[in-house]
Image (cartoon, helix red, strand yellow):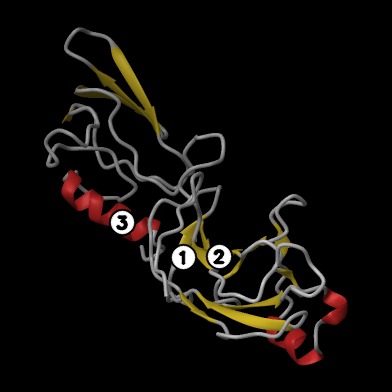
Amino acid sequence: MVVLKIVCANCHLASKNLDVRMPHQVLPDTIFKTTIEIPAKYAKRMQPIASGEKGQMNVGAVAIMPEGWKLAPKARLPKALKKEMKGLAWAQYSKELPNIVVAGPVPGAQYEKMTLPILAPDPNKEKDIYFDKYTFYYGGNRGRGQVYPEGNLSNNNQFFAAATGKVTEIDGLKVTVTKDDGTTAVTECLPGADIVVAVGEAVEAESWLRDKNSPLLSLRSGKTVSRAKMAAIRSRRQSGTA
């Protein structure tokens, strides 16, 4: 068994294990199922939605199969397998890559276990398909992503001071820091963020390469917290446990 990490380049930045169960051997041109379990405490854990409010945590999954292996057609699905899927819709990633399929986002409380129906190819009928051992890759995500495809942040983040200086204005979610030379820098937090700094407070520019205990802006209410503590908060938030 090969254990690797699938990284989403655009949205989810943290990592957490999932459980995949599938047969070791299958016959040509047959349908078999893979069960993908994405465990989390979905009854308790919430995710921030675009408005800044909290909602139930969603999940999603991706399966990267060898070329020739495909999502089983609906017309060939046994009734028992359809029932087990609970209405979950899988889709090809693209027409050019039918061996890659995705599902979600869907409610995690309902789809903690996802059933994927796969159609095995037939080496007797298909070119470049052989009776051999094949490797499958699976990935899953929990909760809302941190980065949109365009590169801008979602509100599932913490927000840092834009410069070293003194907080001189807080206008809603916009925090203005005045530097020693008199120029200003503005950090605009997104909906759902609670500002933990006050006007007149000294802050340092966000930099993971410098003192991790310098003050910052965060999504947590209360007093200013250290970068070390916020790193732990960020890890929990990204994994859907905060």
Q: Residues within 10 Å of mark 2 (few under 14, many from 20)?
A: many
Q: Earlier in the sequence, mark 1 or mark 3?
A: 1
On residue 46, the disc is: 1
Where 217 sits versus 139, above or below?
above
Residue at (67, 71) in percent of width and height: 130
- Residue in front for this viewpoint, 3 or 144: 3
Q: Which residue is mark 2?
A: 58
- Residue type at mark 1 is Met
Where 7 sits versus 127, above or below?
above
- Residue type at mark 2 is Asn
- Picture quarter containing residue 189? top left
Residue at (55, 66) in percent of width and height: 59
Nearer the camera: disc 1 or disc 3: 3
Seen as rendered, the residue at the extreme bottom is 80
Residue 197 appears at what percent x and percent y? 24, 37
- Residue in front for this viewpoint, 117 or 82: 117
Residue 1 appears at what percent x and percent y? 42, 75
Residue 122 appears at what percent x and percent y? 76, 75
Cα separation, mark 1 vs mark 3, equals: 15 Å
Residue at (55, 48) in percent of width and height: 51
